[in-house]
Amino acid sequence: MNDFTDAVDREAAWFKADQSAQGIPHLIASARPAGPFDIVQADLGRPSARGRTLYLWLENVEERRYALARKLQIYSFVASCLWQRTKAAGQTQADQQGLAAAVAKVVQRVRGPIGDKTHGGRFTAAGEIETGRIVVRFDDPLRAFQTADIWRADVRWQAVDDLPNV
């Protein structure tokens, strides 16, 4: 696979797939049992002014040669988790905890089930590249509380495809 243009779509398909039999929670609210996000999609569509959304996008793509005629194509993904604040009295802590719980489910999805680190065969490997790092960054809750109705957390990880004979 020499073209990386479908990488986000492949990863979004993994995020939407039913993996409950492997113990991985649903992410979409319309699933049974319900996940935390109203929208899970590849790339940024029209940002939702309301609700709880997860947008997947590519941060960068890198090609790295590891043998004479072989390369790896390394994808750095970001899942932007947008979480609407309730604004009801006393709900701030519950909103923060809800966002943290939703992000924990995203991390579970990135890790994948035991024994399958390919996201269902969509990549050569995913979530396990080099150091196996999955990085979560939350917005500053004090600033978000004062200025925003939407709170954000970003989850970053990598996936890789083998590019033979390139």
Image (cartoon, rainbow, N blue to C red):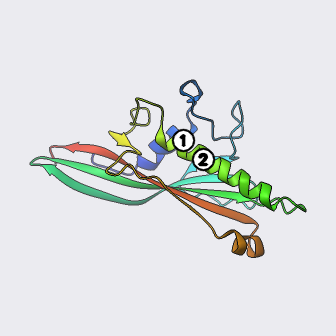
Residue 93 picture location, percent across and down: 78, 59
**Which residue of the protein is positioned furthest toward the top in this rendering?**
21
**Which residue of the protein is positioned furthest toward the left in this rendering?**
68
Residue in the foreground of this view, choosing between 111 and 122: 111
Marks 2 and 1 in Cβ contact (< 8 Å)? yes
In this rendering, position of residue 101 left or right of residue 162? right
Mark 2 element type: helix
Residue at (41, 31) in percent of width and height: 116
Amino acid type of disc 2? Ala
Residue at (68, 40) in percent of width and height: 35
Residue in the foreground of this view, choosing between 54 and 3: 54
Amino acid type of disc 1? Gln
Q: Which residue is mark 2?
A: 104
**With respect to residue 71, does 93 lie above or below?**
below
Crowd rating for badge 2 (residues with CA inside 10 Å; few <14, some 14–19, many 20+): some
Residue at (69, 54) in percent of width and height: 99
Residue 161 picture location, percent across and down: 30, 44
Residue 83 picture location, percent across and down: 70, 57
Q: Which residue is mark 1?
A: 108
Q: Quadrant of the N terminus?
A: top left
Mark 1 element type: helix
In this rendering, position of residue 23 left or right of residue 143? left
Q: CA distance from mark 2 to mark 1?
A: 6 Å
Numbered mark located on residue 136 in the image: none
